[in-house]
Amino acid sequence: MLNLLKSTLRQTLNWSRIGLVLGLILLGLIHGMAILPTQANNYEKQTLLNSDFSGQMLTDSEFDLANLQGSNFSGSDLRGVSLFGAKMQKTNFEGANLSYATLDKAQFNRANLKNAILEGAFAYNADFTDANIEGADFTDVLFRKDMLMKLCSVAVGTNPTTGRETRETLYCD
């Protein structure tokens, strides 16, 4: 009887271990899928008028020379993207993170950059005429002098994520 009890207990423990190992493997797979890097997308030279990219992770994607007029990128993670020469008139970037993005020759005319983060972006020849930059963080972004003067004339607000004042990040004063 004692031997039968030991044998049953041994089998139960073996099945418990197997279940534990399978559970850990499954948990590892699920966790691994959650942290896998997303593949950068290539939207170069595409016409994507009024497209909805809101809340998406688009890090390192390429939008060079794309027509994105009227599109919505609000709340998106756009760190490291390339928007070289892209047309983004009336595009919504509210709360988006554009840190270290390539924005040279991009057209942000009348775009909404409210509370966006553009830290370290390359935007020397970008056009931000009539853009809403309230609360935008432009830390370490270089601009042409004429564009910097336009931006400083309308710069207000504090970025809610970084806590930096827009005017200070543009070195207006």
Image (tube, rainbow, N blue to C red):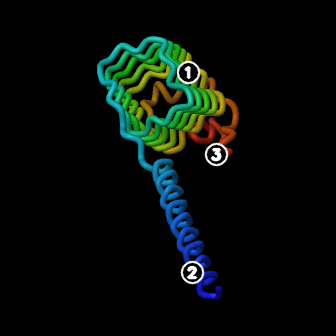
Assign the N terminus to one quadrant of the image. bottom right
Three-letter amino acid code of the residue under disc 3: Thr
Look at label 2 and name its amino acid: Ser
| Furthest-left residue in this view | 45
Q: CA distance from mark 1 to mark 2?
A: 67 Å
Q: Is residue 156 left or right of residue 125?
A: right
Label 1 Cα crowd, 10 Å radius (few <14 / some 14-19 / many 20+): many
Q: Nearer the viewer, mark 1 or mark 2?
A: 2
Residue under label 1, please give it.
92
Residue at 42%, 19% (x, y): give it. 107
Q: Find residue 133 and name its label.
A: none
Identify which amino acid the numbered label 1 is placed on: Asn
> Of tags 1 and 3, which is closer to the observer?
1
- Mark number, residue 7: 2
Question: Looking at the image, which is closer to me, 106 or 148?
Answer: 106
Question: Which structural element holds mark 1?
Answer: loop
* Element type where label 2 sits in the image: helix
Disc 2 from disc 3: Cα separation: 62 Å
Looking at the image, is mark 1 or mark 2 earlier in the sequence?
A: 2
Q: Farthest residue toward the front?
A: 1
Marks 2 & 3, CB-CB < 8 Å contact: no
- The residue positioned 54% from the left and 15% from the top of the image is 110
Q: Residue at x 43, y 49 (%)?
A: 36
* 10 Å crowding of disc 2: few (<14), some (14-19), many (20+): few
Q: Position of residue 140 (x, y in %)?
A: 49, 44
The residue singled out by tag 3 in the image is 162
Q: Viewer-proximal residue, 75 or 109?
A: 75
